[in-house]
């Protein structure tokens, strides 16, 4: 009855020990105000008891938990229900070392997921499709170390993961399930270097190609590869989604362990260049993919000149385009990147004509090009002094608007000042 703070950090409680803790905090005479459960490795079964215990406790005001609290990282979602059911009674939540005022947590949102924001420095954040379910497992977001691969003179990424868990790379959208401490190094590869027209004629590229190495390799239990397919709940399409591995001039297709809305899960790990593909059937079908539109203002040119890109929602393509434009001293015009609907590979798009605005080319075919290749774009020239510039991307065949923005003079003046 006198115990106010209980810190069980780094205790291998197992289910039996945790059950005693649950029984204690459920007791009506319990006076514990602070409970710390970090790195305790619980199972999903006891997490349900823990949820019940916390929801019935009247004294607890501070709860400290970390994502590796559960032995299986995929059971982390169970603990989300703890927050949902305990709500306003608590004052402070410490999640993965960051303190949050519990009273400010919106219980109608997923409190563990960082809000999807778009900043000038990072236009390649994930685009969430309104048609695809978003109920994916939450992973701990982590920023990788950027290194150079001396053999290929390419930029590579490195993660030093000190413990088991489920981790999401912010720069590539890769996710890793690891069972022990591990160092993972990975980089984007080029599809065209491995693509054999005869062997891959029935395959459609559906995500970035990645080369991944891990030390020790056995510490990685699963890799979640990003893809830009819009499956929109179509269960019949999921068996066609596979992972292509390239080694010794051959391509091997792997049936994934799971196909999620934005990721494909592989548990048969082979550390060769690999990425998500869609296997075409003999029947002609239109494959929908998530897309992004990026608008850049060319520096120091009169009349005003813009470059408008329409890309598959692959962060390697978007980031590569962004870095190329920055190197050209262009500046991104901060407008939403999400298209109004998923697009079809091979469809033609055009920019709706406006007076005193010149657009070249007249139309573009929407295709996937490797990140190392120059991406297609519309060049838009407009007279200075216009009250505003309205840009509308239209799908040619159906005459449907897929992206529309209004660029105001003050946005361009602000952009030029920044430069």
Image (cartoon, grey):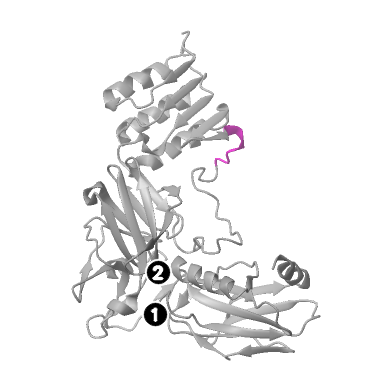
Residue at horizontal 66 percent and vertical 73 percent from the top? 405
Which residue sits furthest top?
A: 2
Instruction: For mark 1, give the secondary structure.
Output: loop
Residue 351: image location, x then y, percent? 61, 84
Q: Comparing marks 1 and 2, which lies closer to the viewer?
A: 2
Q: Which residue is mark 2?
A: 229
Q: Which region is colored magenta?
A: 102-107
Residue at horizontal 27 percent and vertical 79 percent from the top? 281
Q: Which residue is mark 1?
A: 286
* Mark toward the start of the polypeptide (1 vs 2): 2
Front-most of 10 and 1?
Answer: 10
Residue at horizontal 38 percent and vertical 48 percent from the top? 167
C-alpha span from label 1 to label 2: 11 Å
Residue 83: image location, x then y, percent? 49, 35
Q: Is residue 97 visible?
A: yes
Residue at horizontal 55 percent and vertical 68 percent from the top? 338
Q: Is residue 136 visible?
A: no
Drawn side of residue 176 relative to residue 309, left or right: left
Q: Residues within 10 Å of mark 2 (few under 14, many from 20)?
A: many
User: Does the magenta-highlighted stretch encompass residue 396?
Assistant: no
User: Does the magenta-highlighted stretch encompass residue 106?
Assistant: yes
Asked if residue 304 is positioned above or below residue 73 in the image, the reply reads: below
Front-most of 70 and 211?
Answer: 211
């Amino acid at each position: 009855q006198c115990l106010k703070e209980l810190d069980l950090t780094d205790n291998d409680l197992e289910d039996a020990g945790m059950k005693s803790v649950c029984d204690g905090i459920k007791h009506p005479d319990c006076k514990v105000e602070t409970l710390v459960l970090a790195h305790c490795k619980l199972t999903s079964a006891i997490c349900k008891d823990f949820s019940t215990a916390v929801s019935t406790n009247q004294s607890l005001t501070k709860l400290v938990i970390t994502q590796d609290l559960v032995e299986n990282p995929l059971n982390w979602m169970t603990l989300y229900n703890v927050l949902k059911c305990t709500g306003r009674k608590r004052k402070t939540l410490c999640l993965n070392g960051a303190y949050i005022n519990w009273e400010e947590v919106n219980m109608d949102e997923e409190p563990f997921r960082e809000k999807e924001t778009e900043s000038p420095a990072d236009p390649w954040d994930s685009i969430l499709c309104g048609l695809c379910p978003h109920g994916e497992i939450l992973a701990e977001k982590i920023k990788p170390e950027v290194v150079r691969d001396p053999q290929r003179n390419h930029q590579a990424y490195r993660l030093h993961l000190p413990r088991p868990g489920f981790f999401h790379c912010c720069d590539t959208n890769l996710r890793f399930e690891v069972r022990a401490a591990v160092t993972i190094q990975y980089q984007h590869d080029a599809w065209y270097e491995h693509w054999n027209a005869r062997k891959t004629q029935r395959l459609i590229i559906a995500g970035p190609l990645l080369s991944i190495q891990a030390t020790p390799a056995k510490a990685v239990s699963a890799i979640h590869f990003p893809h830009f397919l819009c499956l929109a709940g179509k269960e019949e399409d999921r068996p066609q989604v596979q992972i292509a591995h390239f080694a010794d001039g051959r391509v091997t297709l792997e049936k994934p362990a799971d196909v999620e809305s934005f990721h494909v899960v592989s548990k048969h790990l082979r550390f060769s260049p690999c990425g998500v593909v869609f296997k075409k059937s003999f029947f002609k079908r239109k494959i929908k993919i998530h897309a992004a539109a990026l608008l850049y203002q060319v520096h120091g040119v009169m009349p005003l000149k813009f470059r408008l890109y329409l890309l598959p929602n692959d962060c390697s393509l978007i980031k590569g385009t962004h870095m190329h434009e920055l190197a050209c001293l262009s500046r991104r015009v901060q407008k939403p990147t999400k298209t109004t609907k998923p697009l079809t590979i091979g469809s033609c798009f055009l920019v709706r004509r406006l007076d005193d605005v010149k657009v070249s080319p007249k139309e573009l075919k929407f295709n996937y090009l490797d990140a190392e290749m120059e991406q297609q774009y519309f060049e838009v020239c407009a007279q200075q002094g216009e009250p505003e510039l309205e840009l509308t991307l239209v799908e040619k065949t159906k005459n449907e608007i897929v992206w529309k923005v209004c660029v105001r003079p003050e946005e361009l003046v602000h952009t030029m000042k920044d430069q």
